[in-house]
Structure formats: C-alpha cells, structure tokens
Image (cartoon, coloured by chain):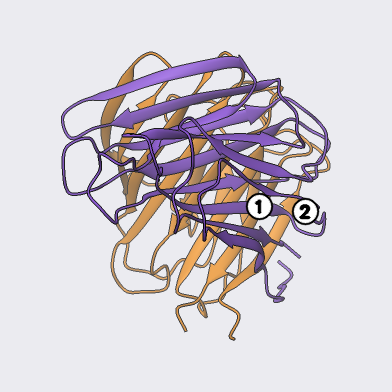
Amino acid sequence: MPTTYEPIATTTLGTAASQIDFTSIPATYTDLKVVFVGTATSATGLRAQFNSDTATNYSRTSLLGDGGSVYAQRATSVAFVSLGINNNLSTTIPTLRTMDVFSYAGSTNKTVLTNESTDTNGGGAATVAVQMWRNTAAITSISLNVSGTTIAAGSTATLYGIKNA
Amino acid sequence: MGLKMPSTYTLISSNVLASTATSVTFSAIPATYTDLVLRLSLRASADGGPENVQITFNGATSTYSSTYVQGTGSAAASSRYTGQAIIQFPNVINGTAYTADTFGSVEIYIPSYTASQNKPLSGIGASENNATGAFVNATAALWSSTAAITSITIDQSGGNYAIGSSFYLYGISKS
C-alpha cells in the first residue's frame, strides 16, 4: 500500500517566536495539511501566508459559534488566511488549529479549509471557514505568524503532505 | 526544512458492530503517535434520534468542556458546556426516526494526546438523511488533564448503537 499521508516538517518552539515557517515545500503531494497546537504570549489570532505574500490576496467565509451566538462572516481582499477569526490563541490553554490546502501545486487559485477549536473551559469558540489565496503559483512556503506578539514556547506546528496516488 | 517520509496515518484499531452496543472502548492506545483521529459512522438502534456521541478518556468522568456551533436546514445555534463528565458531540447519531440505512458521521481530531498539557480536540459531524432533522456541527472541546490518553470510550445519549455502526481509531505520526 503506498504511503499517502506523510509528515513534511514539524516545529516545536523552544522559545517564543513571532512565526513558524515551512519552506522548500516539495511539489510531490496533492494536498497539504497544517496542524497547530499551542498558545501565544498575549491573546491574538494566528495567521497564515503563502510564498511570503502579504498583499490583500486572501478572502474567507466563516461560521463561528461562541457558546451563545452564531456568526457567519465574509472578508474579502485581506492579507492573510485567518486561523483566529474572532477566536484568539489563549495564553494558557493550548488550542487546535488545522488548515487543509487543496491542490497547492496546481495552477489555479488555492482553496483552504480551516478549523479552529478553541474551548477554554468557559470561553472560546468553534469556527470553520473556507478561505482562498488568489494566486496561481504553486505554494512552496507557509508562514504561521501572529501580529504584535509571539507564539509561545512549546507550541507545535506540523506540515503534512497528502497524495492521491 | 528537513524532509521526513515515513508512513504516518495508521489504523490502530477498529470495530464494526455485528450486534448492538451501548459503547465502544479503545484501550491500551500506544504512545507512539503524535495525534489521534476517530472516524465514526453511527446509528442508534432503538431511539428516534438524533443522539449525541459522548466521549471520555482514561475512564475519567470530570474536567471536560466543549463549545459547538450547529446548523439545521433553517437555523443555527451555539452552546457551551463546562465542568462536564463527558464531551458531547451533539446530534451526530441518526436514530430510528431517520431514513433507513443512513448513518451519522463524525471525525474527531485529538492532537498531542501524550503531551503533559491540557488536551484540545475538535469534532466535525453531521446527521444527514435526505429529510428534515439533519444537523451539521463543529465542536471545540477540552479535557483539562495533563495525563496521556491511553483509552477512549465512545458512549452515546441513547440506548444502543445499531448494527453496522463503525468506529475507527487512527494514529498520526509527525516523525
């Protein structure tokens, strides 16, 4: 049976850092999956950007429930994939963020599914979203980062490659 | 970036019910993986439904919490549970009132299950049956325990899981 789900790289922060980068991503897979578990040194949203593109080439439509209310939101022409849609990283309790990137090496715009699971025993939210990077280039790098603070030590991010053959 | 290429998505154990059961337990889960994934296909044998999946780890009956967002064909809602004896994944088990031969589906992702930190997890589920009464939901949950997860019990809010319900536990390695 061929191997179809492989770890490409993983990072566990020994010290707080403003970003975790996956570079030189090979084009040999069909899809990518990023799994992040961690905290921040002050509450903030986690973000992702592809190929160092910080221009407003991203968009998203999301569904969020915070334990009391439900929000469906859309953001167009924004500068990053959000892994913190009104749903910050905790400073104390690790939370889970996943991102599936489809056909990342293809020559079409890139579709991304994200899932934010942030239950902090009294706070947090469950969020799912479809997001897009309007760029036809193959994705060769992914940056996970935060603005104005740092991802805390002990946080882990892993990049997996998924093959369809 | 160092490349690592071993196989990583491995079936640890499975159970496809040949007779009804109130719960299914995966025990003696090895600590050799990084994350766990549960993939469940579920129907209740005697309750109209929909029913909830109820999960506990290591036999513990405290310190669970969860937040979920849920949609039907016409409305959406969100609720939160704190200080629970179980983690609830609501309305993902098709009951007897649902279209015959339809099963609810759930995928539960448990990262860093051996880490000495509180355990976050996520669930995505649905009880589609080509009729009213279907739900889709996303759940964020937390087990406030630093213990490594060595067993998972998958109970439910109704009486029994129906024959044909399936339970698959996978391990994912990052190295």
Left or right of residue B28: residue A59: left
Q: Measured from the top left, where is residue B99 in percent x and y?
A: 22, 48
| Residue B83 versus residue A97 in the image, above or below | above
Q: How far is mark 2 from mark 1, CA to CA? A: 10 Å
* Residue drawn 81% across the image and 52% down it: B28
- Percent of width and height locating residue A2: 58, 85
Residue at (38, 39) in percent of width and height:
B46
Colour chain A appears in: orange
Q: Nearer the viewer, residue A148 or A151?
A: A151
Label 2 or label 1, whichever comes before in sequence order:
2
Chain letter for the residue marked with disc 2 in the picture: B
Question: Which residue is found at the position 33% from the left and 57% from the top?
Answer: A111
In the picture of the structure, the residue carrying the numbered disc 1 is B36
Give me the chain letter of mark 1: B
Q: Is residue A119 toward the left or the right of residue B137 in the image?
A: right
| Mark 2 crowd level (few <14, some 14–19, many ≥20, 10 Å Cα) | some
- Mark 1 residue crowding within 10 angstroms, few (<14) / some (14–19) / many (20+): many
Chain B: its colour in the image is purple
Evaluate whether residue A83 shows in this view. Answer: no
Residue B45 position (above or below residue A71): below
Q: Give, as a three-letter code, the residue at label 2.
A: Ile
Question: For mark 2, what is the residue?
Answer: B29
Disc 2 is placed on an element classified as loop
Residue A75 placement (x, y as % from top left): 28, 35
Figure quadrant of residue A62? top left
Secondary structure state at the residue bearing disc 1: strand
